[in-house]
Structure formats: structure tokens, C-alpha cells
Image (cartoon, rainbow, N blue to C red):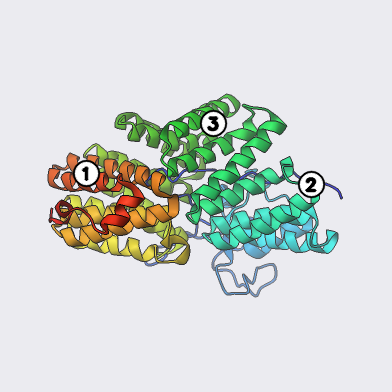
């Protein structure tokens, strides 16, 4: 059968969880809810605005589900920022270019709800024209899965990718370069669901395919190198992570130039590595530079900036600037709430970090409230046994120690260790536990809470004993139960 007319879609801009957050994408960029006044919106195609009669000639009726008829589907701004969903669909169908999901104005890919709706149309058309098992269908499924991932529907994204990979491998054969993009997207889905081992294995397959096809050092390998570094980060392999990130950044800067948005993922990830290795100042510089690039490219308040804001906040906390830490975390949280909703799992680490930030200055009520929200956000099935849930509980344990509740801290720490072991295995979980504890120790040291640091160090020593010791002990050492 014929190969798809367009190359497989590139993965979205990759960002590492960076021991501080996870990777969200999506760019519906809806206006703020609540009492905040919303800007007047005009459709770039039909030129009707918010106050137009939706039943009039030329105006769009909006989605059948009664949702917002406007989307902000790409990086266009000004008068081109908004478009009616129906107008965008009509334009897409009229073009008849069924795998072209790029804005004709800014040339950037459509994202989020817009991409989801167009990819659904693309899939239906490919099934009609080529049959349900054609590679063209797999191509559409990859875009559709990417849209669901951007919207936070990770399980649905994974299922779509598995269907697409099955079709592609049946048509092209395993190990063919046409399967590489789907392998990378599927790896990302497994990572978000807490299965880091499978994520790493899929990325290694993807990198091997790309290097055999394109050659070592080719630009098409850079994203995979970065994402593989992310997996090594999750597994606690810092040296291997740093090596892969430096390779990725070198390839990207050579290809795109320094300061290009495609370099930010490697910059954010390298910042985390420098922090882990004790060079907090260098890590903060890289994060400031990355945020500047992202805000210039996507705009201030875009969801793509939320992770960098979160990680930059932690860097300021490690340096003792708690006001700046809280400010940046609040910015990150507002962006995520606007984008994902107030209870989504993508909020959990920022919420837990805010709990720690408030506890560090004695705001007990706020600290406990943020920690409780963080744990509720982790209550969905796919997050229960994830790395992020383990880190949320570790942050919560430090807050309980700061508030003098040793027993509650011990419970949270035990649960954290157990979840990390299930998600990562005994060796990697001990490394991650130690790395996260070290970061928190720096923050508590910076605000003069040596008592909390001492408890965290005891917890870290216990975590490093590994799975067998934890199972035999069944509880933390007596010293860890004592209040802070």
C-alpha cells in the first residue's frame, strides 16, 4: 500500500518531569473563568464576535455539546487569535489536506480541542477512503492521540497510539522509521501513567530506529534523546541523563540556533540536573532563559510555560527567596487551573509545592489545604501508583514535620516510599526519594528550619535502605516519628 503522504507528526515540545512537575501540553488557551472579564473575541474567518447572533447567516452555531464555540487553536495573536470551531472545520474540509494540521498564518500546529476535532474528521475520512487498517488511518490516530494527551486524557491517548502502532507495524514492519513517532508518543503516555520502565524501553527502540535511519547526531534524534533523558531522570540515573541532555541541546542549537523555542526542553532538563548536582545558581539561570524563550514564543500565561514556572519557583526556594517561590507557583497554578480545571492530576505537584512554600513561612491553614488538594488530584486511577503521587506525599511529609505532626509525616513518608517502589522499582525509587529529599532539605535549610531538614535526612536514609528493608521494618525509624 502507499505510504502516508505527509511524514508522521512530530511529538509535541517535550518537557521533562524534572523532579518537580510533569509534562502537560494543550493550547486551547481559554479565557479565565469566574469573575475575570473576558476579552472580546472575533472569529478570524467569518469576523463574527462574541455578541453575534449565532443563528444568523454566516455565524457559527457552535459545538453540538453547547461548549464554547471559540477556540484559540495555535500561536496566532491579535485579530487572528480566535476562530469558531465550525469555521475551522469548514476550512479544514474545504482544503481537503487531511493530515495538514498547521495554521496557514503562523505555520504552527493546531493544538488541544481544535486538533482533536480536526483529527477526528481526518480519521473518519481516512477510514472511508482507505479502509480501517490503512497507514493513513494510523497517521490520523497519532494526531488524535496527541490532542487527547494535550487535553489531559492520557489513557485514551495511549489506546489510540496502540491502535496506530499496530496498524503501522503490520503495514511497514517492526523497526521501520514510520513507526518511530508513534513509539515516542506511546512512551510519553506510559510515562504520564507512571510506567517509566516501559517508557524507557519504547524510547530506546525509537532512538535506535532513528539513528539507523537518519544517522547519529541528526536533528530528528534530538527530541528522543531529551525524552530518554527524562526517563533516566525518573529512574535516578543522573549521569546518563546529563549526557543525553547535552547531546540533545548540542544538536538543537546547531540546527535551530541558540534561543529557539525548540531548545527549551533540554534547557529545563539541564537546569534540573545542575540543581541536583548542587549548582543551584546555574540551574536558575537556565530556567530564567527558558521561560524568556517560551513566553516570547507562546505568550505569557500559556500552558507551555507552567512547568518552567513551577521549576523556577523551586529554584528560588532553594535559594531562600520564598516570596518569589510562592509568586511563581501561583502563576503556574492559575495557568493549569484555567487549562485543565481545578482538580486535574496535572496540578498535583504545583499544589504540593505551594503547601511546602506556605508551611515554610508558618501559614499552617494554607499549607494543609494545598497538600490536601494535591492528594485529591492524585486520586484518579492512573495517578495512584505514579511517581508524581509519591513526590506529592513526600512534600506532604515535610509539611507535617514543619507543623510538628510527626505521626502524620511518618504515614505520608511510608506511603511515598511504597508508591515510588511500585512505580519505579526498589533501586530507582530509592534514588528518586534521595534526590527529592535533598531538594527539600535545601529549601527548609534556606528558611532556617534545621529541625525539618534533620527529619528529612532521616527519611532519606531510611529510603536508601531499599525495598527489602522497608518491607521488614514496616514503619519508619522512631526518630522520624518525632514531631518537628
Q: Which residue is mark 3?
A: 248
Q: Nearer the viewer, mark 1 or mark 3?
A: 1
Q: Which residue is mark 1?
A: 457
Q: Earlier in the sequence, mark 2 or mark 1?
A: 2
Q: Does the CB distance between marks 1 and 3 fall below 8 Å?
A: no
> In the image, 180: left or right of 467?
right
Q: Residue at x 53, y 28 (%)?
A: 247
Give x and y (percent) for residue 314: 31, 43
Q: How busy is the neighbourhood of tag 3: few (under 14 within 10 Å), some, or many (20 plus)?
A: many
> In the image, 109: left or right of 151?
right
Quadrant of the rendered structure where residue 205 is? top right
Q: Tell me the distance, in whole angstroms, between the alpha carbons under discs 3 and 2.
A: 28 Å
Give x and y (percent) for residue 67: 55, 71
Q: Nearer the viewer, mark 2 or mark 1?
A: 1
Q: Earlier in the sequence, mark 3 or mark 2?
A: 2
Element class at badge 1: helix
Residue 457 is at least partly visible in this image: yes
Q: Which mark is residue 122?
A: none
Q: Viewer-proximal residue, 208 or 314?
A: 208
Give x and y (percent) for residue 135: 78, 53
Q: How busy is the neighbourhood of tag 1: few (under 14 within 10 Å), some, or many (20 plus)?
A: some
Q: Residue at x 21, y 44 (%)?
A: 457
Give above or below for 81 relative to 313. Answer: below
Q: Residue at x 30, y 44 (%)?
A: 464
Quadrant of the rendered structure where residue 150 is? bottom right
Q: Which residue is mark 2?
A: 172
Q: Earlier in the sequence, mark 1 or mark 3?
A: 3
Give x and y (percent) for residue 58: 69, 67
Quadrant of the rendered structure where residue 59 is? bottom right
Amino acid at each position: 500500500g502507499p505510504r502516508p503522504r505527509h511524514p508522521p507528526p512530530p511529538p509535541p515540545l517535550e518537557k521533562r518531569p524534572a523532579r518537580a512537575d510533569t509534562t502537560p501540553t494543550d493550547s486551547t488557551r481559554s479565557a479565565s473563568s469566574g469573575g475575570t472579564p473576558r476579552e472580546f473575541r472575533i472569529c478570524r474567518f467569518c469576523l463574527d464576535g462574541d455578541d453575534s447572533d449565532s443563528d444568523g447567516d454566516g455565524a457559527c452555531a457552535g459545538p453540538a455539546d453547547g461548549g464554547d464555540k471559540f477556540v484559540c487553536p495555535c500561536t496566532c495573536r491579535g485579530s487572528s487569535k480566535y476562530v469558531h470551531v465550525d469555521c475551522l472545520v469548514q476550512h479544514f474540509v474545504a482544503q481537503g489536506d487531511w493530515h495538514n494540521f498547521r495554521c496557514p498564518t503562523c505555520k504552527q500546529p493546531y493544538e488541544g480541542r481544535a486538533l482533536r476535532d480536526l483529527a477526528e474528521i481526518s480519521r473518519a475520512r481516512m477510514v472511508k477512503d482507505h479502509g480501517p487498517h490503512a497507514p493513513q488511518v494510523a497517521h490520523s490516530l497519532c494526531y488524535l492521540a496527541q490532542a487527547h494527551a494535550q487535553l489531559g486524557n492520557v489513557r485514551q491517548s495511549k489506546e489510540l497510539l496502540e491502535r496506530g502502532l499496530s496498524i503501522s507495524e503490520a503495514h511497514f514492519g517492526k523497526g521501520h522509521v514510520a513507526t518511530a513517532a508513534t513509539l515516542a508518543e506511546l512512551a510519553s503516555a506510559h510515562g504520564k501513567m507512571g510506567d517509566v520502565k516501559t517508557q524507557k524501553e519504547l524510547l530506546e527502540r525509537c532512538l535506535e530506529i532513528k539513528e539507523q535511519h537518519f544517522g547519529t547526531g541528526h536533528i530528528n534524534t534530538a527530541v528522543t534523546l531529551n525524552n530518554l533523558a527524562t526517563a533516566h531522570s525518573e529512574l535516578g540515573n543522573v549521569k546518563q541523563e546529563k549526557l543525553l541532555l547535552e547531546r540533545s541541546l548540542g544538536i538543537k542549537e546547531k540546527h535551530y540556533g541558540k534561543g529557539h523555542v525548540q531548545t527549551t526542553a533540554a534547557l529545563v532538563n539541564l537546569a534540573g540536573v545542575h540543581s541536583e548536582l548542587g549548582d543551584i545558581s546555574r540551574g536558575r539561570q537556565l530556567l530564567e532563559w527558558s521561560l524568556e524563550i517560551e513566553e516570547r514564543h507562546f505568550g505569557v500565561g500559556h500552558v507551555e510555560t507552567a512547568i518552567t514556572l513551577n521549576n523556577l519557583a523551586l529554584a528560588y526556594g532553594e535559594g531562600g527567596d520564598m516570596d518569589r517561590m510562592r509568586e511563581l507557583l501561583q502563576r503556574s497554578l492559575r495557568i493549569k487551573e484555567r487549562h485543565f480545571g481545578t482538580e486535574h492530576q496535572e496540578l498535583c505537584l504545583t499544589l504540593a509545592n505551594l503547601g511546602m512554600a506556605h508551611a515554610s513561612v508558618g501559614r499552617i491553614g494554607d499549607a494543609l489545604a494545598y497538600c490536601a488538594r494535591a492528594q485529591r488530584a492524585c486520586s484518579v486511577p492512573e495517578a495512584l501508583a505514579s511517581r508524581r503521587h509519591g513526590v506529592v506525599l513526600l512534600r506532604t511529609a515535610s509539611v507535617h514535620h514543619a507543623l510538628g505532626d510527626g505521626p502524620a509525616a511518618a504515614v505520608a513518608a511510608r506511603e511515598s516510599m511504597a508508591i515510588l517502589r511500585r512505580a519505579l522499582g526498589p533501586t530507582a525509587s530509592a534514588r528518586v526519594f534521595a534526590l527529592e529529599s535533598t531538594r527539600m532539605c535545601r529549601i527548609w535549610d534556606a528558611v532556617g528550619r534545621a529541625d525539618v531538614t534533620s527529619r528529612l535526612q532521616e527519611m532519606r536514609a531510611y529510603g536508601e535502605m531499599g525495598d527489602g528493608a522497608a518491607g521488614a521494618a514496616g514503619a519508619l525509624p522512631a526518630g522520624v516519628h518525632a514531631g518537628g
